[in-house]
Image (spheres, rainbow, N blue to C red):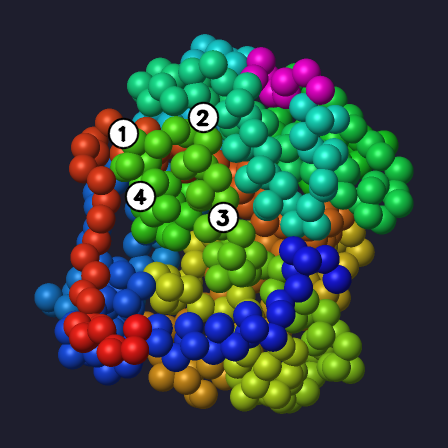
Amino acid sequence: MSIYSEIKPEVRALADLCVKNTKIDPELYVKYDVKRGLRDLNGKGVLAGLTNISDIISSKTVDGKSVPCEGELYYRGYDVEELVRRQAGDHFGFERIAYLLLFGDLPDQEQFRTFCELLSFYRTLPTSFVRDIIMKAPSSDMMNTLARSVLTLYSYDEDAEDISVPNVLRQSMQLIALFPLLSVYGYQAYRHYHDGQSLFIHQPDPKLSTAENILRILRPDCSYTELEARVLDIALILHADHGGGNNSTFTTHVVTSSGTDTYSAMAAALGSLKGPKHGGANIKVVKMFEDIKAHVKDWNDDEELTAYLRKLLHKEAFDKAGLIYGMGHAVYSLSDPRAKIMARFVEGLSKEKGRSDEYQLYSNVERLAVQLIAEERKIYKGVAANVDFYSGFIYSMLDLPMELYTPIFAIARIAGWSAHRIEELVGGGKIIRPAYMAVQPHREFPKDV
């Protein structure tokens, strides 16, 4: 065991002391009306900012009361479902959405051509970056690799500290263009040095979209089908932004408000997204379904499936966390619009891949889980499948390695983060600093200290 990972007994003892003197009585949160997680007891978020970039609708006011409704997501005022419908068949849908998020309007033909040309121009890493940075000490976690690469790009930028809007926009467009390369090359380096696999470093094609280039540089033969590229493009669109209050986007606002550089702000957002409660949730879904396949003989037997799902809720199956992963969302109640859109494309892709039986399993679990959770848990706002429920299945059908599931999320969300960073720089001014109440009593020094 390396000295860098060894936990000595003395450290464990100190950790116990740390926990003992750090834990706060939960009743104090009620006493002082603290909004834990910046949410009230009903799960409603505390209003901490304003944004023009995206909007989430989960309830509507009827007769003066807030009632749950089918979920809706808007980018710059446009319904995402309508945006996806209009982008259907266009492999450059994500690029159009990135333009919309950054600049506030959908591009005309000339604006879009210029934007794509700029992304293509910026989709080039510094000389020897792959050899000197990505291939040195490859990490088993691609999000760490991605964050390290982003922070290292600071050293190659002569104007890294300039936070004027033109310079931040230039940096943002570079990162939007480079995230696919940094993610996939990091994975290729890891599987080569740790798994002994052949090393493939394919150059991106300037004529191809982000989705197409991801598949091109990842696969040994650079090949992919039209449907594969289209479905991945839709996934990128749906992950591009999600309001200002999700953990990583709020992190972007908080860190940006301190006046720091773009690379530091985006590395902080990546650290947030890496967490299994945020960007890593779809990996949990896929692993849970692998466990279902191993323990449920008949995937179409409602009774057998329900019995397994009940075990999940009772902490008797899978990771014994008491959760059916992919079900429920912090904001949405009756439905997550992203999951509904994904479900439509999943069916077609599953037929192309010969995995219709698995698609049916997902559909069965979605249907039964909603009923079971309503019976077993006190849900104040309803429960439905979220975007993570189907995204992992989509990625597995695209033969994307699990190590890239969260980086794919980041490849999409960097567009939203960039828009929110610029929004904070333009309209901010004050550092974001919420209040914390100290509940540790003041003490006298011990006589023997």
Q: CA distance from mark 3 to mark 4?
A: 13 Å
Q: Earlier in the sequence, mark 4 or mark 2?
A: 2
**Circle 3 is placed at which residue position?**
271
**What kind of residue is marked 4?**
Val
Residue that numbered label 2 is attached to: 172
Q: In the image, which disc is placed on residue 425? A: 1
Find residue 94 and report its horizontal and vertical position in percent.
Answer: 52, 33
Does the magenta segment cover residue 401?
A: no
* Contact, mark 1 vs mark 2 (Cβ under 8 Å): no
Measured in 3D between alpha carbons, the distance from the residue under mark 4 to the one under mark 2, in whole angstroms, is 17 Å
| First to last magenta residue range | 119-128
Callout 3: helix, strand or loop?
Answer: helix
Residue at 48% across, 73% down: 14
Image height check: is 361 above or below 26?
Answer: above
Q: Select label 4 or label 2 by which is in front.
A: 4
Disc with the residue nearer the chain's start (1 vs 2): 2
Marks 1 and 4 close (CB-CB < 8 Å) = no
Q: Dot 4 corresponds to which residue?
A: 254
Percent coordinates x, y for residue 222 in the rendering: 80, 30
Residue 15, position in %: x, y? 49, 73
Select label 1 or label 3 by which is in front. Answer: 3
The quadrant the C terminus occupies is: bottom left
Q: Between marks 2 and 3, how big is the CA–CA gap?
A: 17 Å
Contact check, label 2 and label 3, Cβ < 8 Å: no
Q: Amino acid at mark 2?
A: Ser
**Drawn side of residue 19 relative to residue 207, left or right:** left
Q: CA distance from mark 1 to mark 2?
A: 13 Å
**Residue at screen point 46% across, 51% down:** 272
